[in-house]
Amino acid sequence: MKIIKPKNLKKGNTIALLGISGRIKEYERLQHAKAYFEQAGYNVVISDSCKSSHRYMAGINTEMCLDELHRAFLSDDIDAILCARGGFGTLKLINNIDWKIIKNNPKIFAGYSDITVLLNLIYLNTGLITFHSPMANGDFGDIVDEYTKNAFFNTLEGKTKCFYSENSTIYNTGKTTGKLFGGNLASLVSLCGTDFVPNSDLILFMEDLNEPIYKIDKMLTQLFNVEKIRKNVKGIAIGEFLNIEDKKTLNEVIQELALDLNIPMCDGFKITHGRTKDTLPIGVNAEFDADSGIITLSDDYVCE
């Protein structure tokens, strides 16, 4: 598969804030995000799907969200796409996405949580590197975390080379290489039963929140019951699992996974639903050192 690098983010670029997942409950937060980016030197447009909803999802219907996604990639006036929020909705789009539109009109596409579905499928189906990043509504819609802001702009501008864990637990020692792949665990598992795993060595990163431990155990088991996942994942970088009632039991579950897989694995990365987070490119070659808790990017992931 030919890798496509989007153009890096520059001052004066136009960023589209895109609603293709959960409905926007507090539109004023999105307006705050728009003002934030404009003050930082960017132009901003907000998709119409952010201004309407059906049930718990953005847009008046799924077709509207699909159309907004296609239009954002097709538009020569838009340089980067930042998803408004997660929730649920992207899984309803995947069977009708025109991947040729995305492949022929590459640009930055960024988000996390439910957007994990599209981050990985866009890379798989087009070769376009995507970005697991903070989002407009939750991260830029209020007081912006300084680390998160710097990580976001540094990565999208092409300046980031490494990601570091803090106070990490080493579940398995060692170094490995592969392409970065992953995101929200529940969203990844929702893709089981579809073709979602790249045919290459992978460094899997994952996070989640508000999930009972038995469900995390179930999701990890389901994910690694997928033959291509078990075969292709060569290392695991674990972010935060937030709002867990029993961290000791979660640690036991992860240790059992590490024993089963016997690949480099550690936690402590700023990959999270929390305020302080890194922005990671999906599809780029990287080296993962579980002993030191460092992910080092081996290639450039944006172009001028």
Image: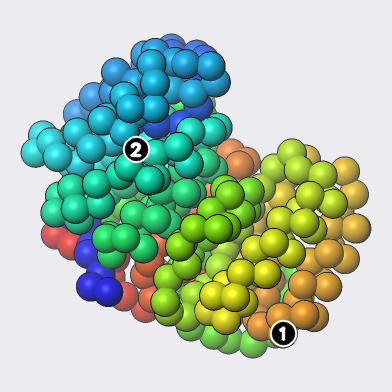
Which residue in the rendered view is the most extreme toward the left?
Answer: 76
Q: Is residue 226 above or below residue 231?
A: above
The residue at the point 79 percent across, 66 percent down is: 254
The residue at the point 57 percent across, 72 percent down is: 229
Q: Is residue 15 left or right of residue 259?
A: left
The residue at the point 58 percent across, 86 percent down is: 175
Residue 160, percent across and down? 37, 62
Q: Quadrant of the C terminus?
A: bottom left
Q: Is residue 33 above or below residue 120?
A: above
Q: Which residue is mark 2?
A: 82
Which of these two is toward me, 190 or 289?
190
Q: Is residue 199 left or right of residue 265?
A: left
Quadrant assignment, res 199 = bottom left
Residue 168, percent across and down? 72, 67
Q: How many marks?
A: 2
Asked if residue 143 can be seen in this view, the reply is yes
Residue type beneath disc 2? Leu
Which of these two is toward me, 243 or 127?
127
Residue 37, percent across and down? 30, 30
Q: Which residue is mark 1?
A: 262
